[in-house]
Image: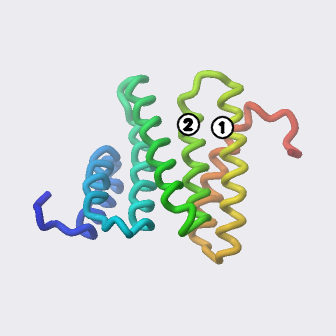
Amino acid sequence: MSAGESLESTMSKAVELEKSYDWMGSVTLYRAALGMVPERDVVKAGEIHERIGYGLFRAATQADSVDEFKKRMRMSVEAYEKAGELLEKVEPARGLYCRAMARYSDSWFVEGPSQKKELLDDCWRLMKEALKSFDAAGDQLGYGKAFRSLSFCLWDKWDFVDDWRE
């Protein structure tokens, strides 16, 4: 990456790497892009942290070992948490979505079933709040993204539910 490369160019290259399933390559570029974001641009920084969280989640599924899987999932949790923290005041729905995704990523590497259930319950609660917020804001794309993610959370929650009427 050249010294004069722009934020937009770096982000575009990261998206191209995502399209070819080079998740760690995209994460590397997103991290470089973070250094180009002005400190006052909280939304862009939050967006990039969200992309890093997603990339690390996907990269974890490509890991060659259990240890590498857990390491990448932990980093995914951290990136989603940071995105949620940055976005919660300026784009509350996205902040809730990122916090929910942090819980979902976290649920993938915990050992105990009760802890996994707790994380998935929290993911479900936060994602439902995000859905309401996206709906209230008229953000249909955000709503669709959250709805899709909620379905994964519910699928994983299947093993822990005694009564689906909850």
Whether 53 is drawn above or below 142: the answer is: above
The quadrant in which residue 49 appears is: bottom left
For the C terminus, the image quarter is top right
- In the image, 54: left or right of 35? right
Residue 140 position within the rendered picture, expressed as x and y whole percent measured from the top left: 61, 73
Q: Nearer the viewer, residue 45 or 107?
A: 45
Mark 1 to mark 2 CA distance (whole Å) = 7 Å
Label 2 element class: helix
Q: Secondary structure at mark 1?
A: helix
In the image, taking residue 3 as reference, residue 111 lies left or right, namely right
Q: Is residue 36 left or right of residue 150?
A: left
Q: Tell me the kind of residue under disc 1.
A: Leu
The residue sitting at 59% across, 22% down in the picture is: 111
> Residue drawn at (69%, 43%), measured in percent from left and top?
122
Q: At 26% across and 67% down in the image, what residue appears?
A: 7
Q: Is residue 143 above or below residue 80?
A: below
Q: Nearer the viewer, residue 111 or 163?
A: 111
